Image: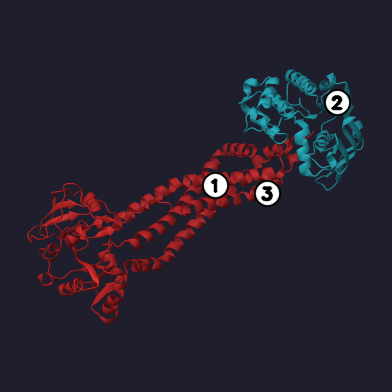
Chain colours: A red, B cyan
Amino acid sequence: MTLSLIVRRSLRQHLLSTVVTAMSIALAGGLLISVWVVKVQSQTAFTQMNIGFDAVLGARGSKLQLVLNSIFHLEASPGNVAAADYLYIKHHPAVKRAIPIAVGDNLRGYRIVGTLDELFTGVEYAPGKRFELEPGGRLFNEEDQNAKEAVIGNFAARKLGLKLGDTFHPFHGLVYDPTKQHADIYTVTGILKPTNTPVDRVIWIPLHGLQTMSGHDPKYATDVSAVLIQLRSPSAGFPMDLMYNRQGNRLTFAWPISAIVADLFARIGWFDQVLALIAYLVALVSAAGVLVSIYNSMAARRRDLAILRALGARRRMIFGAIVLEAAAIGTLGMALSFAAYFAIVSGVAAIIRAQTGVLLDPWTYDPVMLWAPGGMILLCALGGVVPAWKAFRTDVASNLSPIS
Amino acid sequence: MSLLAINSLQKSFVSPDGERKRIVNVPEFHLGAGQQIALRGESGSGKTTFLHLIAGILAADSGSIRLGQRDMAALRESARDRLRAETIGYIFQTFNLLQGFTCLENVLLGMSFGPGADRARATSVLERVGLGHRLHHYPRQLSTGQQQRVAVARALANRPKLVLADEPTGNLDRKNAQESLALIRETCRETGAALLLVTHATEVLAGFEDVNDFDVLNPAGDAAS
């Protein structure tokens, strides 16, 4: 009770420095936890993100580019796949399902992708999860070559303000250029429910719609940009990898998708390390702030410490009170750090979702939420050792003025 | 038998110019249980140092300070701290109240280093000194006389065997000084505590049967700076 009372009163007596120091710890702790959580969650989210497919077949080029283009809808397409190649892999005995996609148009920056309705009816985009439409909607009609209909990803629909029955003109290219409007007019027949996948950011139309869009070169009207593939067994990827990537030289077989994305994170791992280093340094500086804050107030505290000692407080209790006070500032700061963490991660998550469709969840537990506060409080307590030592050595008699 | 028995007590300090000055040199001093003694001495004569030595705040160079069965001068610092907290109440000239703590907390803190904080006892002592209605006030919200009463309550809350009072009326006006002195002496009598009071003010000495001159008690002490 005594120690706790001394610490609480001391924190209150030095309220301004307590609050300022706790706020700096909150920012440092929030940054540290955020960097860690964003790193872990984004790595997990991206490497597990395959919208239900095992591999992608595309034009000869980088596997990463192929995956980013066809799964994440981020990169430019490396080229086209001929209809014969699509049909060959579609009927390959090792392939369970092959769904072609065609890219090349956009609506105000959101990609328009041509595909088959089988993507929405036959695929689980995550284990146990299938695509669903918002009430009142339906999939596009791919049987009728003249029907120009679109299904909109949830995020794209919200951002573009599209509702069922709305119409739009596609624009040519992956980058929005108002001068490159196609003559075709598409009608929104369905809006997908949120999936927290890159699918949410895409405007989906029938494959033939994109292939035969007015202004597109009829020479390539049967080509596709890539083929999304489900294999019959995980090991079936080996012979196909051999066939396309080692023996062939026209196409690229990107498999397994998770390993290719993981390779991307391995390549940018240095960036994570730089961020983590900055966060650790900020945490260290904040802990040093505790030391400076308490140390600077020691002159003002000397009399109180001397009084406590004169009342019978042992030196080790005074030492403990100062260390505990430093730890208490750290605890207060780390409690506030979760507010900073939610603010930072929510902001980062909004950016990542807008750019990729992948959702990070700040509410998901991560062990860093325990070890970062623990470590930070320990660091603050260590920062309190220096002023505590000074308090330990406070001379009682000379600080109990006056002397008669 | 004496509650406090001092023999050949010596304490010296090194002055800023490097000269060693003996401040306390008391061959012998006794204080009986429940006895009240006033020590008269000029400012700077070493009275506070003498009380600090008895309280164990300062370590003696030599000699003995027997308090009951224990020799304060022979104890390690932590043991002196414990003995002080358990058996001595100290009233300072400037009260030395902790400004961030309420009256009640000041008294409770004083108790907590000794036998333990007892809220009922702390409240009762504060009521005894007339501050029952100021329990949760901070020292800055009290008059000087009231602050002195809190200091008295804090010194007596642990039922000490010995109360040391260092110029307890030095910061009070005449009326408050008389009231405060009477309060200290009465409460010490009520609790059976011995009182050793040091002062340079002759008017304070009036009511004491035992008045010693500190210069006589401390014959070879150099004046403190």
Q: Residues within 10 Å of mark 3 (few under 14, many from 20)?
A: some
Q: Is the residue at mark 3 from the same chain as the one at mark 2?
A: no
Circle 1 is placed at which residue position? A330
- The alpha-carbon separation of the residues under discs 2 and 1 comes to 51 Å
| Percent of width and height locating residue A121 | 20, 58
Q: Chain of mark 1?
A: A
Q: Residues within 10 Å of mark 2 (few under 14, many from 20)?
A: many
**Is B196 on the left or on the right of A127, as rendered?**
right
Q: Is residue A148 above or below residue A18?
A: below
Q: Nearer the viewer, residue B30 or B20?
A: B30
| Percent of width and height locating residue A206 | 14, 61
Q: Nearer the viewer, residue A239 or B9?
A: A239
Question: Residue at the bottom extreme?
Answer: A247
Say what amino acid the circle numbered 2 marks: Ile
Say what amino acid the circle numbered 3 marks: Trp
- Which SS class for mark 1? helix
Asked whether the residues under the numbered discs 2 and 1 touch, taking CB atoms below 8 Å apart as contact, a structural biologist would say: no
- The alpha-carbon separation of the residues under discs 3 and 2 comes to 39 Å
Residue depicted at x 86% and y 37%: B65
Q: Quadrant of the C terminus of chain A?
A: top right
Circle 3 is placed at which residue position? A389
Q: Is residue B97 above or below residue A221?
A: above
| Percent of width and height locating residue A161 | 20, 48
Asked whether the residues under the numbered discs 3 and 2 touch, taking CB atoms below 8 Å apart as contact, a structural biologist would say: no
Point out the frontmost of discs 1 and 3: 1
Q: Chain of mark 2?
A: B
Circle 2 is placed at which residue position? B37
Q: Quadrant of the N terminus of chain A?
A: top right
Residue depicted at x 79% and y 40%: B80
Can residue A227 be seen by looking at this rendering? Answer: no
Can residue A357 be seen by looking at this rendering? Answer: yes
